[in-house]
Image: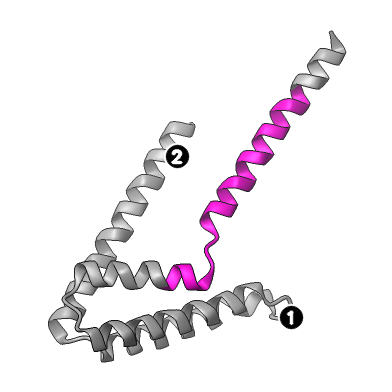
């Protein structure tokens, strides 16, 4: 019976660790994937010209590559990462804003806010389901 309990415990641990690993892998996107997804979302929600679309793709890719490099650079002091990413986000936001009209930028702010609220709501529902 003790052997069965040990085997069952190992099986449960294995399933939990596999599930956690799969979730982490699902959330981790390459910079290129992230930039493409963000650009597509902007294209769907804003009336971008072809010139704007190309420039926004370039800005998003640059941001994604730089933020990925900061988060994965072992030589960066962990206590400084948040500040570095905040600075990069501010630069990204300025670049995006300078390539949108005022109306497009206002729409973009609303879209991001709504997406953030939706993510927050989904996380709360997932927490309720867990416990």
Q: Are marks 1 and 2 in contact (CB under 8 Å)?
A: no
x then y, percent, for residue 111: 23, 66
User: Which residue of the protein is positioned furthest toward the top in this rendering?
Assistant: 1
The residue under label 2 is: 127
**Which of the pair 75/36 is nearer the observer?**
36
- Within-10-Å neighbours for mark 2: few <14, some 14–19, many 20+: few
> Does the magenta run of residues contain 62?
no
x then y, percent, for residue 69: 61, 79
Number of the label disc, if any, that sits on residue 75? 1
Cα–Cα span, label 1 and label 2 = 34 Å
x then y, percent, for residue 126: 42, 39
Side of 119 relative to 76 (left or right):
left
Residue at (65% x, 73% y) in the render = 72
Quarter occupied by residue 90 = bottom left
**Which of the pair 88/100 is nearer the observer?**
100
The quadrant of the picture occupied by the N terminus is top right
**Which of the pair 48/101 is nearer the observer?**
48
Task: Identify the secondary structure beneath mark 2.
Answer: helix
Colouring rule applied to residues: one colour
> Does the magenta run of residues contain 24?
yes
Label 1 vs 2, first from the N-terminus: 1
Closer to the eye: label 1 or 2: 1
For residue 98, above or below residue 121: below
Residue at (30% x, 52% y) in the render = 118
Side of 67 relative to 50 (left or right):
right
Task: Please give the range of residues in magenta.
Answer: 9-35
Residue at (57% x, 74% y) in the render = 68
Side of 86 relative to 57 (left or right):
right
């Amino acid at each position: 019976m003790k052997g069965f309990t040990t085997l069952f415990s190992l099986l449960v641990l294995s399933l939990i660790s596999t599930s956690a690993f799969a979730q982490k892998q699902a959330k981790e996107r390459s910079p290129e994937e992230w930039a493409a997804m963000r650009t597509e979302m902007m294209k769907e929600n804003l009336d971008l010209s072809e010139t704007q679309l190309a420039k926004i793709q370039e800005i998003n890719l640059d941001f994604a590559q730089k933020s990925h490099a900061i988060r994965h650079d072992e030589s960066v002091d962990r206590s400084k990462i948040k500040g570095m990413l905040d600075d990069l986000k501010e630069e990204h936001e300025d670049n995006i804003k300078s390539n949108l009209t005022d109306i497009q930028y206002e729409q973009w702010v609303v879209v991001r806010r709504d997406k953030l609220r939706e993510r927050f709501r989904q996380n709360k529902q997932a927490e309720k389901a867990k416990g």
